Image: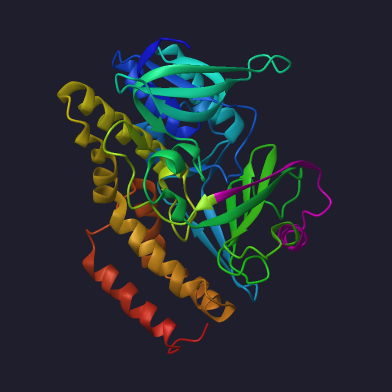
Amino acid sequence: MDTKTYDVVVVGGGPAGATAANDLAQKGIHVMLLDRQGRTKPCGGAIPPRLIKDFEIPDHLLVAKSRKARMISPKDNRVDIPIEGGFVGMVNRNEFDEWLRQRAQKNGANRTQGIFDRITQDMDGVARVHFEDRTFKDNLSNHSVRARFVIGADGARSEVARQCVQGAEKTKYVFAYHEIVKAPQSDPSHDPDRCDVYYRGTLSPDFYGWVFPHGDTMSIGTGSADKGYSLKAAVARLRETAGLSEVETLRREGAPIPLKPLPKWDNAKDVVLAGDAAGVVAPASGEGIYYAMVGGRLAAEAVEKCLVTGNNKNLNHARKQFMKKHGQVFWVLGIMQYFWYVNDKRRERFVKICEDKDVQRLTFESYMNKELVRKDPMAHLRIFLKDLAHLFGFIRA
């Protein structure tokens, strides 16, 4: 067995893992980034300005900049919301994730292609990470390296989490599916700067459908926690509704997405989770890239604290700091999804609420800055009262 010892082995090279590896490598920490590669996660690809700033994302990775959103109700009522003073960046995950991995490698991470197998303990208590090397497809081989710490960023249904973190197996998931298609050219009905969001039970019984611009392509998708619901059939209906049935399909992708953050992210010894492995996908919106990268950064900080202090209890820093910064937002979004996504009558009222200027302004200020906006308490009060009026039917949808 290989006796090479790393300070940290990061399992998974998506936004969370690549961010963690990059942050650690920049600080001179001996880190290995283990990623299976060759697979693109289904994702709308939306990233906020806060992510672009905090993680220094170059403009060339943005294949589109959406400056408005269109909410579409079950009865086809449409609410256009301008994103004043900003935009939603759109990235192609295959290019975006690869750039993040390359950046980590350039900054000193040892990038290795392989499939994680298991973690064992050597006689001296140091973890040993076993993986299958896929460098040469016709000559698979088993390898292992030693690691003082392991960051599990291997996605939903994380094998690192299953093996090492108590309670991880109890996590519930939704399933997302999308199709990447060629964007129609010179078609005035499809705005390359607009994200369309469909709230309809025919497209998802508990989530929404989306049509997002990606420059020369588009992402058309939906999701649901209902295991018996056909997402492929729903996307076919969405494409027909959006007038995109005849455009060329480039690829189809599906994957599970966690419903909420895991109650525990570490084993109090040498493993900490990040990204989808930790369950950090926002309710209601399904946004995951920003929260994955924040989780990767916090996991890196937690491991660094352990390396500096020798106190492995610092691994819990990652979850504590994440929930301190974003737990309230996740709670609010979870309540919103529970109330408004339950049936088409509620969805109709929800889209009606989106006509309100206070709702529009505060929603996108919160989205772009990744903080609940508190500077205008009267606006929040007005929204609360209007929500109640819509919920109890005092206002017609």
Residue 255 locus on image (x, y percent): 61, 47
Residue 298 locus on image (x, y percent): 30, 35
Q: Is residue 346 visible to us here?
A: yes
Direction bottom: furthest residue? 394
Is 6 placed above or below 119 here? above
- Quick one: 267 or 351, which is closer to the camera? 267
Residue found at x 67% / y 49%: 178
Direction top: furthest residue? 3
Quadrant for residue 106, please give it: top left
Direction right: furthest residue? 246
Is 221 placed above or below 140 here? below
Magenta stretch encompasses residue 218:
no
Is 114 placed above or below 344 here? above
- Quick one: 49 or 309, which is closer to the camera? 309
Residue 4 locus on image (x, y percent): 40, 10
Q: Is residue 349 left or right of residue 184?
A: left
Residue found at x 62% / y 70%: 200
User: How many numbered discs sit on the rendered protein?
Assistant: 0
- Quick one: 75 or 360, which is closer to the camera? 75
Q: What's the magenta region?
A: 234-256
